Each structure stands twice: as structure tokens, then as C-alpha cells.
Image (cartoon, rainbow, N blue to C red):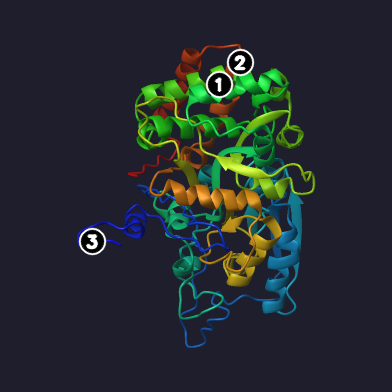
Amino acid sequence: MSHPGEITRRDLLRRIGLTAVVVGPGAGLLSACATGGGTAASPSASAPAPATSAAFDPKNPFAVDAKKGLEVVIFTGGFKDDYATGLHQPMYTKAHAGATIKHTGTQNVGTMLRPRFLSGEVPDVVNNSGPEAMDVAALAAEGHVAELTALWDAPSFDDPSKKVRDTVTPAALEEGKLNGKDMTLNYVVSQRALWYNAKLFQEKGWTLPTTMEEFKALGDKAKAEGIHLFAYPGQKGPYYMLWNMLYTAAKIGGNKAIIDIDNLVDNAWKSDAMKASVTAWHEIFTKYSDKSYLGLDHTQTQVKHLQNKFLFYPTGSWLEGEMAKDKPETFEYAIAPFPSVTTADAMPYGAIQVGSGEVFFATAKGQNPQGALEYLRIMLSKEGAKGFVEKTGSLTIVNGSADGVELPPGLASAAKATDAAGPNVITSARFEGWYKELFDYAWAQQNILMGGRMTVEEYLDKVQKKADDVKADSSIAKQTRDA
């Protein structure tokens, strides 16, 4: 029971920009962490606004012409593309009889689309995710990304009395901004932390380590049984480890450690929190992993995880759906928070990272801008969102997207962990989208560090120098955030 003047947990979540996502029986509160907006806008193209004439149709707010074809490119990573071909695209063609969709699924988004953006022959909707995701901030600065304000202000697909923006978690709206403008649809709510086999831990009688010392002690036990403590993929997916180090730094020094990096604050990469985090994980990888993982991609590494070759894997809550066909009965995914590094960490052990991701955008120079917005509006419908949850085992930003859906064990574990974390939510690293060149450089240098070819100090110096170069480059549009 709350008392007069007391801030309830729900009030606190609202104040810090979190909103509940209703989930199935037994699952707790799922939230996405809202972060700040930007500054002066970079060049971009406005998407078509909903019609305002007397002929306005709330069921077709963008006046889609079914005779115009629509082209959609989907990243076929952990979520595959069945949700697009078997759900969202049929919904589009049903709503607009006679419409046709050209669909392409690829794991190599950048390789496929960069030449097309140079030529000007672009698709209408892009799912810009995966290891080859394009630099969306650079594309926006060049006028290739359409603003989505019209989408958020349009009538929702399910209830014309509601705007689309009122049907989703506000965090996704904030995390989809570039220079204060609505530019991307971050469709999925995910938790990024450490993943492990709950059945193995139960069999061995092991408990989750809460401190880095306990983590290493467990590593010694596992090593005696021929099991590594930790691994990450050095090829496709090496940025999982960068997330790991950034989020641990936030636990040590508070979210300011990441916010300062996003804002290109001087020496942010050399903060005490970042140094402590990188030092700790460098020791873990050096003593309790195997350099051979640096030569593997994410799928190869995740298969070894399913074989209990190592205990903990750093990634997001899409993992369970991605590996569903390979997972044996003896393996049950569960989430573990990052272990505390010091006794003075700013955030408690239970803090985890929750945010929105799986980026979609509408191209500004496509052949069917009206259809692009309509396709995204359909994705944000109750049917489109719930169907995605059912097909992928991951939650969307649409409120109530998992109502009545039985969650798999890993996602239920993530929901429980998020509920236990309460307001102790680690923020997303926004520079991943703002300054992709810096992000890619950081994980590439990280592989050199983990391979034993540079020291922690050299790593932090190199990445800080790269951040300084980005800050000094007037051709790169700068972004800022307050929280």
C-alpha cells in the first residue's frame, strides 16, 4: 500500500520514461528505457502526412494506391523473416486489395543495399539490423530516410480514435529519434544480459554468481569439468561483447558512463567505470574462455553454448527464438544480470539492460512512400504485433502485444528479471546508431584486445582517440541526450 507523498513503483517508471508491456501468465513487468532526444536536425525527407481533406479515410490514412508495388527488405537474423512473409505482408495485401509486395530476406543488409542507395533505386521499407546494418544516421543526413512523425500521428490500425503513438511504449519513440526527429521504428523490446542453461545449473547445484569474484570462482569449478565460463563470437556478433562491457560500466558508474560516451564527452571512454569494466571482462576472457571463439560467428558460438561448452553468453532476448530449432531438451534458456564488479557499484546486481531495437525505416526516395508508412502501421497493429510475438518468441513495443501468449522459459525469465530490477534499468548505448563508425571501430579493437595483442589502456586510448576524431569532424551530425 502506498502512502500520501510516496512515489509508487508505477509512478517512478513513468517518471523515468518506462511503460509496462503486458505479458502472459507468470511473467512480470517488461519495460523499455526511454532516453533523450537530439539537437538541430540534419537533412531528411518528410514522409507523406495523413490526408486532411473531406475524403480522409481513417482506414487508409496515407491514401495508399494498391496499384503501386511495395518493396520490403528484411534482415533474416534471429527472427528470420516468416513474420513478414506470413503475417505483415498478407495483412497489407488484404487491407489493400490488388497490392503486390516484392520481398527480400538477407543477412547482408549493407552489402545488398549500399549500392542501391548510391544508384537511387531503393526499396520502400528496410529492416536495418544485424552485423551489416547500415549507418542510418549517415543515411538520414543524406536525405535517404523518411521522417515517421506522420506514422505516429496517424489513426491506429485497430482503433481510429487512437493515434499510433498512443499504442506503443514511449521509450521506442525516443529511441527512434535522430536530431530530435522521428526517423526509425525500433520494433522489439529486448533484454540484454548474460544467458545460461538453467537445467545445467540445477543439475550441478550451481547458483548464479552475483559478484565478479563469485563469477571467477564458478569459472574455476566449470574449468575442472572441461567447461569454459564465458564466450562471445569474434566474427558476426562481436558487438555483443562491446554491449557487455558498456552495460557493466553503467552498473559500475551509473548510466552516465554510457550517456557521456554517447555525448562524446572528453575522455568518456577512459572513465574509471569503463576502465574497470573492460579490465574485468578482459580477465574473464583471458582466463576463462578460449581464443578460438574469436574465429566463430554468432550461430557457431550459440551451438557450442547449447552443447554446454561454456556457461554464459552475452546477447539479447531474441536468442531463444533464434536457436529454437537447435535447442535440445536438456537446455533451458534463462537470463542472468551482469555480476557486480566492485562493492561500490552505482547499480545493484539485479540491474539489467532493457531497450528497443530491431530497426526499421521508410526510405525517403522509394517508389511507394505511402505504402511504406502503411506497412509500418500494420506492423504496429494488435494482430501484427501479437503475431510477431507468437512467431518469434520476442516482445514488440506495442502495448499488450503478448496478451494471451504463453512465453517460452527464456523470455519468461527475462520478464521476471526485469520486474525484479524495478527502476534499475541500464540505458541503451545510442552511439551505436549515431556514430556507427565509432561503434564498429570499438568492437574491432576489442577483438584485438581479447586476442592478447594490446593492453586495456591501449584499447581505451585508441577508442577515445576515435571518439575525439568523430567529435572534431564537422561533416558528422552530432547528437546529444540528457538521460
Residue 194 disc label: none
Look at 57% across and 65% down and name the residue there: 401
Mark 1 / mark 2, whichever is N-terminal: 1
Amino acid type, residue under disc 2 in the picture: Lys
Q: Secondary structure at mark 3?
A: loop
Q: Is residue 284 left or right of residue 434?
A: right
**Front label number (2 vs 3):** 3
Q: Relative to the observer, which residue lies in front, 399 or 125? A: 399
Q: Is residue 196 left or right of residue 479?
A: right
Q: Quadrant of residue 302?
A: top right
Residue 3 disc label: 3
Q: Secondary structure at mark 1?
A: helix
Crowd tier of the residue under label 1, counting other residues whose Cα lies within 10 Å: few below 14, some 14–19, many 20 or above: some
State whether residue 254 is above or below residue 188.
above
Amino acid type, residue under disc 3 in the picture: His
Are the two marked residues, 1 and 2, in contact with CB atoms closer than 8 angstroms?
Answer: yes
Mark 1 / mark 3, whichever is N-terminal: 3
Q: Is residue 269 left or right of residue 83?
A: left
Are the two marked residues, 2 and 3, in contact with CB atoms closer than 8 angstroms?
Answer: no
Look at 45% across and 17% down and name the residue there: 461
Crowd tier of the residue under label 2, counting other residues whose Cα lies within 10 Å: few below 14, some 14–19, many 20 or above: some
Q: Relative to the observer, which residue lies in front, 207 or 341? A: 207
Crowd tier of the residue under label 3, counting other residues whose Cα lies within 10 Å: few below 14, some 14–19, many 20 or above: few
Residue underneath mark 1: 216
Mark 2 / mark 3, whichever is N-terminal: 3
